[in-house]
Amino acid sequence: MAGILVVFDFDKTIIDCDSDNWVIDELGFTELFNRLLPTMPWNTLMDTMMREMHAQGVKIDQIVEVLKRVPIHPRIVPAIKAAHDARCDLRVVSDANQFFIETILNHLGVRDCFKEINTNPGFVDEEGRLRTLPFHDFKKSPHGCNRCPPNMCKGLVIERLVSEEGGRKFIYLGDGSGDYCSSLKLREGDHVMPRKNYPLWDLISSNPELIKAKIYEWTDGADLERILVSLIHAIISNNGDGNDGSAATQLFAGTECKLETMPVSSHETLPQALRVPF
């Protein structure tokens, strides 16, 4: 396996929307959701909404069919497969839920590309109702991070992964404010890919010197694929896993995405979030 660990956020990174909002809106529960939103934490609200939807006759099969229609850029799946084919270790760190994420990844045919999914538990109970629980039990054991929502601190997940896989180069892809804590945990030699003009990009842009990792912005799935594949190729070519450049090229042979071979800039000084010159 290549010495690279690629961590994907899910909502608005792998898919092009928020999966919670997508399900609520598509099944016609937006008004109730908006009415309850000011009264409880988001994760608790989603569990409440699943209870209300079940009480009003919504079946799990209906939720699954909605999830299968989720919008996704056509180059995201090839990007995931290219990284997997390059023998990178792929993980998900997301504030969505297990049921939504696994349903979508299975539908896209890429669930087996991911070694681990770190997210809020989501499962169908004995009554046929979808339950969503917090990743961190904030009532019994608060995570103590004031940057993150009470149910999940992604930074703690990244700290664990760094502790377990510290010999690898990390590439982290995300869009939301919840991904900022993760980005702060990355080290020199790691890479962070914030989606341009989304909250993570705004937070990094406001003070990029706080980020130790190299920063590469992206705009859509085609951009994500191009930059991610180029970064993986550059890391392998620079002996990131002990292979030479010819081995790196061979690794990518036969993948769907076009291999970019131009050098990737490291951006030593960052007055703002900068794009990668290709």
Image (tube, grey):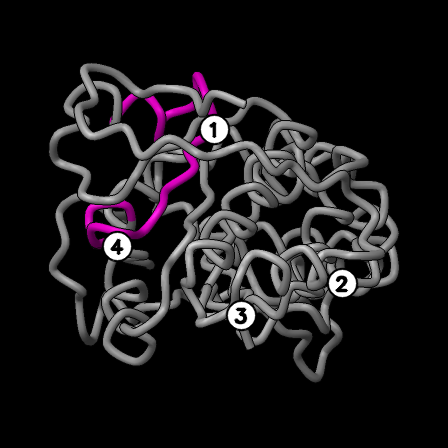
Q: Is there a contact, CB below 8 Å, between mark 2 and mark 3?
A: no
Disc 1 marks a residue whose amino acid type is Arg
* The N terminus lies in quadrant: bottom right
Label 4 neighbourhood size at 10 Å, few (<14), some (14-19), many (20+)?
A: many
Classify mark 3: helix, strand or loop.
strand
C-alpha gap between disc 1 and disc 4: 24 Å
Which is more N-terminal, label 4 or label 1? 4
Q: Which residue is mark 2?
A: 110
Q: Residue at x 65, y 38 (%)?
A: 225
How far across and how far down the image is residue 145, in percent?
14, 54
Mark 3 vs mark 4: give the one in front.
Answer: 3
Which is more N-terminal, label 4 or label 3? 3
- Left or right of 22 in this view: 69: right
Residue 140 image label: none
C-alpha gap between disc 2 and disc 3: 13 Å
Disc 4 marks a residue whose amino acid type is Pro
C-alpha gap between disc 2 and disc 1: 22 Å
Q: 144 or 251, which lies in front?
A: 251
How far across and how far down the image is residue 17, in percent?
63, 33
* The C terminus lies in quadrant: top right
Residue 89 image label: 3
Classify mark 4: helix, strand or loop.
loop
Residue 150 image label: 4
For residue 55, what is the image quadrant?
bottom right
Label 3 neighbourhood size at 10 Å, few (<14), some (14-19), many (20+)?
A: many
Label 1 neighbourhood size at 10 Å, few (<14), some (14-19), many (20+)?
A: many
Classify mark 2: helix, strand or loop.
loop
Q: Which residue is mark 1?
A: 195
- Left or right of 116 in this view: 203: left
- Left or right of 102 in this view: 150: left
Report the span colored magenta: 183-203
